[in-house]
């Protein structure tokens, strides 16, 4: 499986070469199932395009496209440096990277945002990012679930977004999970424009 080829267009959203190379390292480390499973096993929390084989990949592409489009608007983009924009897009492209754990488990791991943030930390020596950049990517991933921070037993597990970067990433993920916002995809799982 050529993982980078499956996210070729979205990787190009990133302008900074070191961030792009770091993202490519992490995409190649994602488990194969990320590119094959649905974003939601029940269909309760995601639109139809995110269901079925490749649904999680399509959800991720939709969230990245939303980020890219929002950042074309100076009223939004001017709140972030170009470097911050690239780091947020990196976070969006990786946010659900371990949704079913490092090894494929039957059900979604509620703590998957923390698992992905830890995975980036574990691999930081292979990345071309400063400690501050790594921390920003980790925090936007860890908090991408927004207000849904409690596990099935009611335990507070995930951090809520607090910073402008965390809120932006959560917003893009949230919008990509709304059934009212539809994207069309071709047979190669690319967004049709």
Image (cartoon, helix red, strand yellow):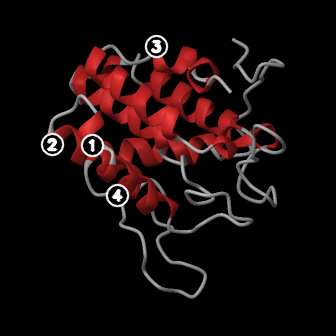
Q: Position of residue 97 (x, y in %)?
A: 54, 46
* Picture quadrant of residue 79: top left
Q: Nearer the viewer, mark 3 or mark 4?
A: 3
Give the residue pinned by disc 4. Answer: 161
Q: Nearer the viewer, mark 3 or mark 2?
A: 2
SS label for mark 4: loop
Q: Earlier in the sequence, mark 3 or mark 2?
A: 3
Q: Nearer the viewer, residue 189 or 71?
A: 189
SS label for mark 1: helix
Q: Is residue 76 visible?
A: no
Give the residue pinned by disc 2. Answer: 131
Q: CB under 8 Å between callouts 1 and 2?
A: yes
Q: Is residue 126 left or right of residue 30?
A: left
Q: Position of residue 36 (x, y in %)?
A: 75, 40
Q: Residue at x 51, y 68 (%)?
A: 148
Q: Nearer the viewer, mark 1 or mark 4?
A: 1
Q: CB under 8 Å between callouts 2 and 4?
A: no
Q: Earlier in the sequence, mark 1 or mark 4?
A: 1
Q: Is residue 112 left or right of residue 89?
A: right
- In the rendered image, the quadrant that contains the C terminus is top right
Give the residue pinned by disc 1. Answer: 124
Q: Is residue 145 visible?
A: yes
| Mark 2 neighbour class, 10 Å CA radius: few under 14, some 14 to 19, many 20 or more | few
Give the residue pinned by disc 3. Answer: 12
Q: Residue at x 21, y 38 (%)?
A: 133
* Picture quadrant of residue 14: top left
- In the rendered image, the quadrant that contains the N terminus is top right
Cα distance between the residues tagged 1 and 3: 21 Å
| Mark 4 neighbour class, 10 Å CA radius: few under 14, some 14 to 19, many 20 or more | many
SS label for mark 2: helix
């Amino acid at each position: 499986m050529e993982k980078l080829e499956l996210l070729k267009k979205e990787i190009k959203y990133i302008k900074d070469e070191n961030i792009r190379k770091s993202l490519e390292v992490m995409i190649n480390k994602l488990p194969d199932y990320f590119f094959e499973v649905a974003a939601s096993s029940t269909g309760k929390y995601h639109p139809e395009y995110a269901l079925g084989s490749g649904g999680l990949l399509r959800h991720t592409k939709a969230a990245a496209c939303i980020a890219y489009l929002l950042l074309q608007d100076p009223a939004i983009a001017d709140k972030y440096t170009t470097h911050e924009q690239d780091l947020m897009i990196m976070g969006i492209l990786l946010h659900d990277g371990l949704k079913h754990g490092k090894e494929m488990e039957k059900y979604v791991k509620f703590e998957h945002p923390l698992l992905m943030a830890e995975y980036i930390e574990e691999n930081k020596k292979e990345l071309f990012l400063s400690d501050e950049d790594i921390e920003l990517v980790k925090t936007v991933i860890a908090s991408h679930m927004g207000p849904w921070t409690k596990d099935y037993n009611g335990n507070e597990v995930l951090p809520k977004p607090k910073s402008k970067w965390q809120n932006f990433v959560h917003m893009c993920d949230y919008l990509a999970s709304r059934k009212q916002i539809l994207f069309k995809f071709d047979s190669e799982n690319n967004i049709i424009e």
